[in-house]
Image: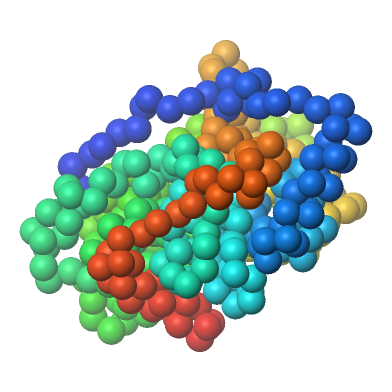
Amino acid sequence: MNAKVEISPIRFPVTDYPRTDDVLTHLPRHDPAEQRALVAEIKAELERQDAVLVAHYYTAREIQQLAEETGGYISDSLDMARFGHEHPASTLVVAGVRFMGETAKILNPEKRVLMPTLEAECSLDLGCPAGPFIDFCDQHPDRTVVVYANTSAEVKARADYVATSSIAVPLIEHLADEGHRIIWAPDKHLGSYIARVTDADLLLWNGACIVHEEFKSRAVGNLLAQYPDAAVLVHPESPASVLEVADVIGSTTQLIKAAKTLPNKHLIVATDKGIFYKMQQAAPDKVLIEAPTGGVGATCRSCAHCPWMAMNSLDQLLETLKTGRNEIHVDEVVRVKALRSTQRMLNFAATL
Ligand code: SF4
């Protein structure tokens, strides 16, 4: 491939974020009977309020189970958006991080969109503030702007296309074939991966996911020495050195499909470990192993579990249903602009 790639020197590093173990330590604990009562109450509220729960693969097991048991949905951000758009419920309860709630609202202005917490951010979103990003795009008016779904509504409003990791490569390939030179934001690792596998001319925003950045290729190599038959499954938000040791690189949904179809008994998985719930369901005979994050003697802050995804709890889910708190609102002018780029994502995904 002959990709031309450049990374912007502009950077908004996200360093002040919670540790996942601190977040988890502060969540309320329940004995099994209390947990059952809590789940029953949430189910009754979902029904009473004509609400459906849409959860990301990285949320807690009990939230994913609740989505399954109530006719809701568990998936990646692209399919969450599609499901929420097509489902007839008048309220969408989105368990995930804020941009996912915003995407649901962009697509469904007539629906009420609630989230268990509005404090669940994403380092990619935080690392791409709308003002500087819009200035950056304006400095390169000849480039088509493609942004990852992990961005604010304002950033999506400036974009020509939105993409998720499941369609990023074919979309960029398609645009490059049509002669577009492209700004890709905000994830530089996913952008660098796209550059490796396409011919696109890419200018990359300098953002990263604080969870996937912690995976370490050398430590994966050590684990492979222990499990020589293992296949390595890696999300493309991981650094290039980790992608180099991967047998499969793909979005969360693509990694779950790979877990099912690969012949290997052992699978080393480099993405948020929340995915293990659905991955193990899809591949019950496989042994799933967390890819190492810190390496020997090092520390990790997320330890393969996103601190913001971890903030989604059953207690807050019930609280938001009871009070209507944590509703997502998007300015209508911004929403209409963001809808254009988001709808293009859905339209393109439908052609694949
Ligand atoms: S895992 Fe990374 S990309 Fe996903 S929500 Fe958390 S910080 Fe954002």
124 or 114, which is in the foreground?
Answer: 114
* Residue 60, quarter of picture: top right
> Which quadrant of the figure contains the N terminus?
bottom left
Residue at the far top in the pictured view: 297
Q: Quadrant of residue 156?
A: bottom left
Q: Is residue 317 above or below residue 193?
A: above
| Residue 315 shows in this picture | yes
Q: Tell me if residue 160 comes above or below residue 287 in the rendering.
A: below
The colour scheme applied to this rendered structure is rainbow
Left or right: where does residue 2 sit relative to residue 63? left
Q: Residue at x 36, y 27 (%)?
A: 15
Instruction: Check the image and name the residue furthest to the left.
Output: 139
Instruction: Name the residue at 79% across, 60% down.
Output: 70
| Residue at figure coordinates x 52%, y 45% from the top left | 325
In depth, the one of 198 and 320 nearer the eye is 320
Q: How many marks?
A: 0
Q: Residue at x 69, y 32 (%)?
A: 223
Q: Nearer the viewer, residue 12 or 71?
A: 71
Q: Is residue 326 left or right of residue 256?
A: left
Residue 135: percent from left, percent from top: 12, 54
Q: Position of residue 348 (x, y in %)?
A: 45, 80
The vertical placement of 93 against 2, above or below, is: above
- Nearer to us in this view, 316 or 58: 316
For this view, does 10 lie left or right of residue 68? left
- Residue 175, image quadrant: bottom left
Residue 262 appears in the figure: no
**x, y (%) of residue 25?**
65, 20
Q: Is residue 1 left or right of residue 80?
A: left
The x, y position of residue 187, in whole percent, is: 37, 50
